[in-house]
Amino acid sequence: MLKRPDEAVLQFARLSSIADIQRCFEFRCALESEAAGLAAIRRTPEQLLKIRSAFEAIKIANESSLPAVDEDFYFHLAIVEASNNHFYSTVTRSLEKSVKEGLNITRNLSLMHSVSRLELVQREHEAIVEAIEAADADAAKNAMKTHLDNARSRMFDGIPT
């Protein structure tokens, strides 16, 4: 069965960039899942506070129906930085423009759907935070992988939730 992207994707992305956005999601899934696992066991109390603060910033933006692209990027960056492996941070920072382009699409698509979709995304973020707080590397990896896989599916497979 041929899957079609959510119709609204074409409103936010240049047609020529959709394949690159899909590849960026694939890359982020591998990179950020591993970084989240490392963050769970290496993060400092200050880094955990930064992750929690970024999570709360997304929540505030959601309550105001704002896209929260910057807030979402800084949430993911805080997790990558908490891996305490500068290679993850360097790569993530170098991909900021591409990642934000994907975030812009996913966040705006979520705003176009029901409030429950934003709540679902935020629960996925919360699962990541909780796993990192609990120092559970496997749960953090899995939560990040699930979140990024779901974000990709919501965008490209037209899944409404």
Image: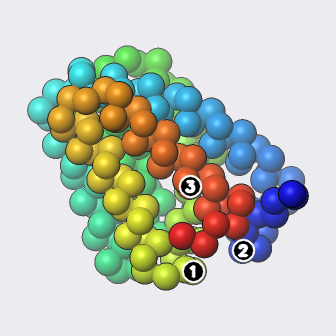
Residue 12, given in percent of the width and then of the height, sits at 70, 68
Identify the element where label 2 is drawn.
loop
Disc 3 marks which amino acid?
A: Ala
Q: How many discs mark residues in the rendered view?
A: 3
Q: Is residue 8 above or below residue 148?
A: below
Residue appearing at x 43%, y 41% in the figure: 144
Of circles 2 and 3, the one toward us is: 3
Rounded to the nearest angstrom, the CA distance separating label 1 from label 3 is 15 Å
Q: Secondary structure at mark 3?
A: helix
CA separation, marks 1 and 2?
Answer: 9 Å
Name the residue that disc number 3 marks. 151
Q: Which residue is labeled 2 in the image?
A: 8
In percent of width and height, residue 23 lies at 72, 39
Q: Which residue is mark 1?
A: 112
x, y (%) of residue 102? 62, 54
The answer to whether marks 1 and 2 mark residues whose Cβ atoms lie closer than 8 Å is yes
Please report the residue visible at 57 percent of the width from the left and 36 percent of the height from the top. Answer: 28
**Of the residues under marks 1 and 2, which one precedes in the sequence?**
2
Q: Is residue 11 visible?
A: no
Residue at 39% over, 54% down: 124
